[in-house]
Amino acid sequence: MSEQYIVSARKYRPQTFDTVVGQQHITTTLKNAIRTQHLAHAYLFCGPRGVGKTTCARILARTINCENPTADMEACGECSTCLSFKDNTSFNVFELDAASNNSVDDIRSLTEQVRYAPQHGKYKIYIIDEVHMLSTAAFNAFLKTLEEPPSYAIFILATTEKHKILPTILSRCQIFDFKRIQTEDIVGHLANICSKEGVVAENTGLHIIAQKSEGCMRDALSMMDRIAGFTNGQLTYAQTVEHLNILDADVYFQLSDILLSKDVGGALLRLDNILQRGFEGDVILNGFAEHFRNLLLSKDVRMAQLLDVPEEHRKVYFDKAQIMPSAYILSALSLLNEAELGFRTALNKRLHLELCLIRLCYVNDVLNTTQSENNSELKKKRDEPNGLVLPQKPVAPVNNTASTDNFQSPNPEVQIQTNVPVQQQVVNTAVPQIPVSAVQAQPVSLPKPVSGNSPAPTSKRPKLGLNILQEIQEQSLQDAEHTGEKIELNQANAEQLFHEFKEHVRVELKQIPLASQLDMMSIRFVSYNELQIVCVTEVNQIYANNQREVFMDFGKKKTGIPDLRIMVQLDASAKKEEIVERKLGKLEIFDLMARQNPALRMLKDTLNLQVE
C-alpha cells in the first residue's frame, strides 16, 4: 500500500525555532525568554497569512514543556512530552479556532478549563487562532482571565487583523509582529524542499513562485506542489509562467523595443498575439508597468537592491536601462498607470489597450518637442533684458553724420535730443512707437496674479496622456514665477481672507448653498500659520471639513505662507445673535417722533398731555 500523500505545507512545517523561515527576530526573542525564564502569560502573534504565526505558537508550546531542552533552547523531540505533542495526544496544549468558537459560552468553557492545573509538565498552553473573530461580549468575558491567569497558564493569540482587537486585550499581551518573508528566503526554502522531493527546479521558476506568493510561505508551497504535479517533477521557468498566468519578461523586452522604434503596426500585432494566448488586458498593463519600474530601478546602481527579478534577468535589465531615456520611462509609467485605472470602466477594452500602446510609440516625439520649446523659451528669456521684449528692428534709423535740423518727428509729443547718445535715442523713440505687428509677434510676458483662479493658458504642444516630466517642469516654473510677498497673519487679515474665499465660492464657483453655510461660520486667528474655522452646527462642521483643503490651498496662494494650516472647531456658543423684529410701543413711537420734531415734546409738556 502506497504512503498517503501530504502536501508540502504540512509535511515540511517547521518543528523547531531554527527551521522557521524569515522570522529570526521573533524566534531569537522567544528562545531568550525561555532561557531566562521570562515567559509572559499572554502573547499576541500578528501578521500576514502564511508567515509562521501558528507554527511559532506550537513550537513555543512544545519547547516550554520539554523535559530535556537543548543548549540552544530547542525541544529535544524524544521526551514523553515532545512525543505526545507530536502525536497530538498532549493534554497540556489546547488549540481553539475563534472563527467558529466566538461566542461567550465558548470563552466561558475555556476559562473553566484554566482552573485545572496540568497533570504532566509545567504549563498549560492555550492557542487561539484568528482571535479577531471573537465577539465583543466574548472579548469582555475573556478580559479577567487573560489579565490574571494561574501561574501555569499561557495564552498565545494569533491574528491577521490586529486592528480589530480591543485595546484592552492588546494591553494585556506581549505583541510580536511577523513580517512578510523575503523572496530570497522563500526561494532557498523551496529549493531545499525540491532537493528532498526529487523535483528538478530552475531557480528562475522558484523566483517567480516566490514573487507570486507575496511573502506567504504557505501559498508558495501550494503553488510549487501544483506546478510540480503539472510538469511531472520538472519545474522550469517557461512552465511556471504559463501555469501562473504570467507573461514572460522576454515578451515585455520585445514589446518595449518595438515601441522605441515607433513601429505601431508591430506593437498592435504583438498585442494581438498576447491576447490570443488568453491573457487579460489588466494583466498585460500591470506586468508592463512592473517592467518599466524595473527599468527605472536599473538606472541607478544604488536602487539595484529594490529590483525583485531573477538573477538571470538583472543583466538584461541593466543593459536595456542604459539605452532607454529616463524621461521615456517616467512618461511610460504615467501612461500605463492611467490606462490601468481606466481599464475597468472602458467599454472597448481592446481599443483602450491599443490606444495606450500607440501613445507609448510617440512619447519620444512629444518629449523632444517639449524639450525644444522649453529650450527656446529659456533662450528667449535670457536674451530679454528685465523681461521686456524689444523690437527686432529699430523704428527709425539714426544717422550720426546727417543733420537733424530739418527732421520732423511724426509724433509731436516725442522730441529727439541731438546731444543724447545714440542708444538712448533709439530707446526713447522706440518705446512709444512699437508697431502692432511687433507686439503680436513677440508678446510681453506678464506676471501671473497671486490668486490664480483663472485657468492657465494652454500650450499648443501635443500631449499624449499624462507626462510626469512636463508636469514637474510646469510646476517648478509656476513656483519660480510666484514672487508674491508673504502676508503676516492676524485676526483682521484672517477675516479678510475668509471673506474673499466666501466671495470666490459665491461669485466665481456659483455654489450658493455652500456660500450660505460659510456665512454662518467665522474665522479665528490661532498663530502665525494656523487659522480655525468656527462652526455653530454639525452641518456647518461637515461643510467645513469638506472645504478645509480647498480653503487651505486658497489661503496659501493669497498669503504666500506654504505651511498654512486650517483647523475646524464646533462651537455652538459662537452662533450669531439673530435680530428679532418686534412692534414698538406707544411711548417708543412718541420718543422716536419727538427726536425728529422736538416741538411735539414741548406741546405735550405745555398742555400736560399723556401718551396712552
Image (tube, rainbow, N blue to C red):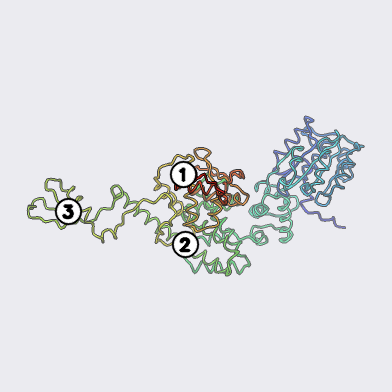
Q: Which mark sits nearer the N-terminus, 3 or 1?
A: 3
How busy is the neighbourhood of tag 3: few (under 14 within 10 Å), some, or many (20 plus)?
few
Residue beneath disc 2: 464
Q: Element at badge 3?
A: loop
Q: Which mark sits nearer the N-terminus, 3 or 2?
A: 3
Residue beneath disc 1: 602
State whether residue 552 is above or below residue 354: above
Q: Tag on residue 487?
A: none
In three-dimensional space, the C-alpha distance between marks 2 and 1, rounded to whole angstroms, equals 88 Å
Of residues 186 and 135, the one drawn nearer to the viewer in this rendering: 135
Q: In the image as oriented, which residue stretches furthest toward the top?
A: 36
Residue beneath disc 3: 413
Q: Say if residue 325 shows up in the picture.
A: no
Q: Where is residue 316 in the image (x, y as percent from the top left)?
A: 53, 54
Q: Say if residue 490 shows up in the picture.
A: yes
Tell me whether circle 2 and circle 1 mark residues in contact (CB < 8 Å). no
Q: Is residue 278 rendered to the left or right of residue 458?
A: right
Q: Element at badge 1?
A: helix
Q: Position of residue 256 (x, y in %)?
A: 51, 60
Report the label total. Answer: 3
Residue, x 71% and y 61% (percent of image)? Answer: 231
Kind of residue at disc 3: Glu
Q: Is residue 12 rendered to the left or right of residue 574?
A: right
Residue, x 80% and y 48% (percent of image)? Answer: 135
Q: Where is residue 65 in the image (x, y as percent from the top left)?
A: 85, 36
Q: Which mark sits nearer the N-terminus, 2 or 1?
A: 2
Kind of residue at disc 2: Leu
